[in-house]
Amino acid sequence: MKTSTAYKLLGLLFGAGFGFVLAAANLHEYDTIHNMLRLEEFDVFLLMGAAIGTSLPLLWWLEKRNAKTALAGTLTLSRSKPTRQHVAGGALFGVGWAVSGTCPAPALVMLVSGAGLAIITIIGLFVGLNLRDRQVAKLAGATTAADGEHRTLARTS
Amino acid sequence: MSSTTFAVLLPDRLPWYLAGPALGLLVVGFFLVTNQPLGASGAYVETYKTVTRKPGAATWRMFYFLGIPIGGFVGVMLKEDGFVRRAGYDALRDELPLGVTALIVLVGAVVMGYGARMAGGCTSGHGICGTAQRSPASWVATCTFMGAAVIMTRFIRIVSGGAI
């Protein structure tokens, strides 16, 4: 199988796994997120803590062992220094998250659970992401270090 | 309202101590295969680039983007509530007309998207994948958006006289 095909299938598979867990944990419901942010239910905070608590030590251990990934050489983790953009962007993201009661991945699950208004959330997300890209291109500014997003890796394997 | 399900195999809400580690293992598994984090806002960006045929688009991220609603749909269909055609945002619509709700949701989503791109990630990117890599930038972004969201929710509660 071609590597590019393998990436597409893996993307589909892990995306489906991610979406499945979001649906199972009810994270696609406005009320789940809203009640969490109202500090009335702490399940979602615990869920995030448990997700980090599982992945952080495992990735640390794998990094120490110079673990080989299946398709892209030795495991490399990204650790960037915080900048003003991380704080300002984070604050804006938090405000928008509170208003729309969902975030990028759960919004997709919200739509397929039958909630029609989620299409507006998804369109709004595309518009907002694109607005920022246009602004950065116009100002010829540097993009923010995105340690959790897609990155271009030097092919090592 | 009628709902559709395949079969009721999942509880109403999978407890955090199962769902959290499951997400964590997906993150680790994705790293072990592709050496990539699985942030969702970046997947939106790559999907947009792929669809508009921008150079350098990571096309396979679009497959990740498409996988989320596919897996989500299966998850929804295995729950008692199942798939229910509705507007959604019931808590907002109880207080506001549909048009106003739609406008508020749209503005919120634009601000959220802009902020995510400015911050370099969202709840999955910085909040789980970045923090798990022990990235200081991700920890700062995550603490900031958590704090901002709690404060904004409090503000909404005060403005709506406790209704929302």
Image: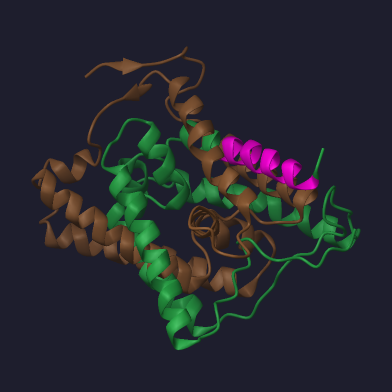
Judge from the rendering whether residue B16 lies leftward or rightward of residue B102; answer left or right: right
Q: Where the N terminus of chain A falls, by quadrant?
A: top right
Q: Where the C terminus of chain A falls, by quadrant?
A: bottom right
Q: Is residue B149 visible?
A: no
Q: At 31% from the left edge and 49% from the top edge, which residue is drawn?
A: A34
Does residue B28 show up magenta in the picture?
no
Depth check: give the residue in front, B147 or B101. Answer: B101
Percent position of residue A114, x then y = 32, 30
Judge from the rendering whether residue A103 lies leftward or rightward of residue B39; answer left or right: left
Q: Is residue A144 visible?
A: yes
How are the colours assigned in the image?
Answer: by chain
Percent position of residue B85, x then y = 27, 26
The residue stretch that appears in magenta: A3-18
Q: Colour of chain B?
A: brown
Q: State whether residue A61 is above or below residue B152.
A: above
Does residue A8 show up magenta in the picture?
yes
Judge from the rendering whether residue B101 lies leftward or rightward of residue B42; answer left or right: left
Chain (green):
A
- Magenta stretch mostly in which secondary structure? helix
Q: At 36% from the left edge and 70% from the top edge, which residue is drawn?
A: A92
Q: State whether residue B49 is above or below residue A86.
A: above
**How many numbered marks does the figure carry?**
0
Q: At 54% from the left edge and 32% from the top edge, which residue is drawn?
A: B71
Percent position of residue A11, x then y = 65, 43
